Amino acid sequence: MENVAKVLDVWNSSLCEKIELAALISRNSTAHKWKATYRSIVLRELTFWRITDLLNQMVLLERSGHLLGARILLRSTIETLGILIYTRSD
C-alpha cells in the first residue's frame, strides 16, 4: 500500500487545475475550435480527478483498518477507469 500512496502523491501533484481554451487553440487551432474536443479533454481530466480522489480515500480507509470500505472504493475506481477506457475507444 505504500507504493500506491507514493504514486498517488505524484498523481495529486500533476492534476490539472484549469483547462484554458485559449491554450488549446494555440496548440492546434484546427482541432480545438469545436466544442467536442474541449469537452472530451474536460471529461478526461474530470475522470482522472475522480480516480485519484477514490484512491486517496481508499488508502485512508485501508490505513484505518476498514478493509471492506477500501475494497468497495477500489471497485469504484476500476469501474471509473473502465468508463475512461470506453470513452477513449470511440
Image: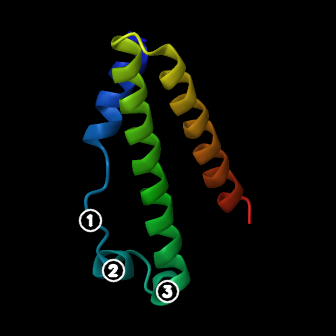
Asked if residue 78 is positioned above or below residue 65 in the image, the reply reads: below
Mark 1 / mark 3, whichever is N-terminal: 1
The residue lying at 74 percent from left, 66 percent from top is 90
Percent x, y of residue 8: 36, 29
The quadrant of the picture occupied by the N terminus is top left
Using the image, tell me which numbered label, if any, was put on residue 21.
2
Name which residue lies at 49% across and 14% down: 67
The amino acid beneath tag 3 is Lys
In the rendered view, tell whether residue 74 sits above or below residue 79.
above
- Whole-Å distance between the Cαs marked 1 and 3? 16 Å
Closer to the observer: label 2 or label 1?
Answer: 1
The Cα atoms of the two marked residues, 2 and 1, are separated by: 10 Å
46, above or below 2, in the image: below
Q: Position of residue 62 (x, y in %)?
A: 41, 15
Residue 26 lies in quadrant: bottom left
Q: Tell me residue 16's x, y (percent).
A: 31, 55
**Rendered residue at 29%/82% (across/down):** 22
**Label 1: few (<14), some or many (≥20) within 10 Å?**
few
